Amino acid sequence: MSAATQPVLTAGGNTPPAPVHVGIIMDGNGRWAAARGVPRALGHKAGAEATRRVVEAAAGQGVSWLTLFAFSSENWRRPADEVRDLTGLMRHYLRHEVRQLVENGVRLRVIGDRTAFGPGMLAEIRRAEAETAGNTRLNLNVALSYGGRAEITAAARRLALRAAAGEIAPEAIDEAALAGELETAEMPDPDLIIRTSGEKRISNFLLWQAAYAELVFQPVLWPDYGAEHLREAITEFHRRDRRFGARNG
Ligand code: IPE
Ligand code: IPE
Ligand code: MG
């Protein structure tokens, strides 16, 4: 049977397990606002509402790890007022979402260069991480000022420093050693990466970790994203035949 005709349902009629780790490149806030003739800031606000919905939907659909790309290391290149709007919204989300996250059993972690933000934001991040640290239903990573290249570079630099200090032999640096220095050490690699808005690129998201992720591109703009879109993406994921370079049969 070819991959395309494999049944989505298992023999017992049960739906197959959800992907363990889903990453989402949440794109299209600006176009959503432009289509309505409203300021971009309103698009970002509506995007934050979508984020709230999707975190709940992911937990409800059995996803264990969810990594959301909220602000890239390159997004600092945007006009200062847009950067201000975005950081304000992220801070507001961190402050006001914690109670809901705790109620939903969500543990929040931030990946990326958090030191690029001001002390107020840093304190908010620390508080949200501490207050949700005991939750186990869904692990939520929010990527802020995150770039895959910067993350890999920092990991390589740490290994080089340890080698120079004589703590590790250069020959001992292998894939596991590098992965162990990434911010996602101890986390499973993403099984499914979704990008909304119709763009078909990675834009520096989880470069190392995405080596064997299934990519699903959905045309919907992020502020319009909901539980049914996540379900569609997971259904598409189940149609894929993952081989990891080997052969299935
Ligand atoms: C995603 O929406 C939010 C961020 C990248 C911070 P955009 O602001 O990129 O929206 P488009 O791509 O311009 O529509
Ligand atoms: C990627 O979206 C980053 C986030 C969604 C946070 P961008 O809108 O910044 O990506 P490009 O510029 O279209 O590649
Ligand atoms: Mg964009």
Image (cartoon, grey):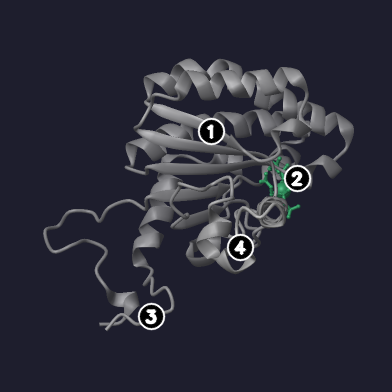
Which residue appears at 38% of the width and 19% of the height? 103
Tell me, for residue 51, which label it has, or none: none
Amino acid type indicated by mark 2? Ser
- Residue 162 position, x and y percent, is 66, 52
Amino acid type indicated by mark 3? Ala
> Tag 4's secondary structure?
loop
One can see residue 209 in this view: no
In the rendered image, the vertical position of residue 19 relative to residue 41, given as above or below:
below
Q: CA distance from mark 4 to mark 2?
A: 32 Å
Q: Which quadrant of the figure shows ligand 1?
A: top right
Q: Answer with the quarter of the image where residue 135 lies.
A: top left
Amino acid type indicated by mark 4? Ala
> Tag 2's secondary structure?
loop
Which residue appears at 38% of the width and 71% of the height? 242
Comparing 173 with 2, the one in front is: 173
Q: Point out the frontmost of discs 4 and 2.
A: 4
Provide the residue designation for mark 3.
246
Q: Point out the frontmost of discs 4 and 3.
A: 4
Q: CA distance from mark 1 to mark 4?
A: 32 Å
Categorize mark 1 by other alpha carbons within 10 Å: few (<14), some (14-19), many (20+): some
Q: Mark 4 or mark 3: which comes first in sequence?
A: 4
Q: Mark 1 or mark 2: which comes first in sequence?
A: 2
Q: CA distance from mark 4 to mark 3?
A: 31 Å
On whether ligand 2 comes within 8 Å of the CB at mark 4, the answer is no
Q: Point out the frontmost of discs 1 and 4.
A: 4
Q: CA distance from mark 2 to mark 3?
A: 34 Å
Provide the residue designation for mark 1.
109
Provide the residue designation for mark 4.
169
Provide the residue designation for mark 2.
73
Q: CA distance from mark 1 to mark 2?
A: 17 Å
